[in-house]
């Protein structure tokens, strides 16, 4: 489990770092500014929450919990709730484009979400294929 978690954190870090640089240069190119719209805060927020929730998902998977899908859905919902509680109030005082504010949250959220789903499905399928091999004998 620790190996899977460290692999996930490392991959998530580099994917988010590359996405952050592309995103910040795009904002600069559009005249918004490199770090405007709380960009670094959004990426850090999503990285930390995704790492935490992936660890929780690995713990549930380790226990062979049949409720893994529900835990995943709850963690995704909780990310949005925490965003609206802690991050969104910071946007209200900022004047400017509402779409840039939305994108500043949505890009890191979807990037981390897709990576989380991809690696979780691979991990579940890997274990599932081992279970089927036992029954084929």
Image (spheres, grey):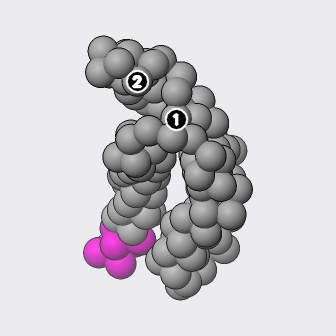
Q: Residue at x 30, y 21 (%)?
A: 30
How far is disc 2 from disc 1 in space, using C-alphas? 8 Å
Q: Is residue 70 above or below residue 112?
A: below
Residue 80 lies in quadrant: bottom right
Q: Is residue 38 visible?
A: yes
Mark 2 and mark 1 in contact? Answer it, CB < 8 Å. Answer: yes
Asked whether 119 falls inside the magenta stretch, the response is no
Give the image location of residue 76, x and y in percent. 52, 66
Q: Magenta segment, which residues?
A: 130-136
Q: Residue at x 59, y 52 (%)?
A: 92
Dot label at residue 102: none
Q: Nearer the viewer, residue 90 or 71?
A: 90
Q: Is residue 68 visible?
A: no
Q: Nearer the viewer, residue 48 or 118?
A: 48
Give the residue at mark 1: 37
Give the image location of residue 81, x and y in percent. 61, 68
Question: Would residue 78 be found to the left or right of residue 34 on screen?
Answer: right
Label 2 crowd (10 A; few <14 / some 14-19 / many >=20): some
- Quarter of the rendering occupied by the C terminus: bottom left
> Which secondary structure class fits the magenta region best?
helix
Give the residue at mark 2: 32
Q: Is residue 102 above or below residue 7?
A: below
């Amino acid at each position: 489990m620790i190996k899977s978690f460290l692999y996930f954190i490392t991959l998530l870090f580099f994917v988010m770092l590359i996405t952050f640089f592309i995103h910040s240069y795009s904002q600069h190119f559009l005249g918004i500014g490199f770090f405007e719209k709380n960009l670094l805060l959004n990426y850090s927020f999503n990285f930390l929450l995704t790492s935490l929730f992936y660890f929780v998902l690995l713990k549930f998977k380790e226990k062979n919990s049949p409720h893994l899908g529900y835990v995943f859905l709850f963690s995704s919902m909780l990310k949005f709730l925490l965003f609206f509680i802690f991050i969104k109030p910071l946007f209200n005082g900022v004047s400017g484009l509402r779409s840039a504010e939305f994108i500043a949250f949505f890009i890191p959220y979807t990037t981390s979400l897709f990576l989380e789903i991809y690696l979780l499905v691979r991990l579940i399928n890997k274990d599932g294929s081992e279970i089927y091999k036992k029954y084929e004998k």
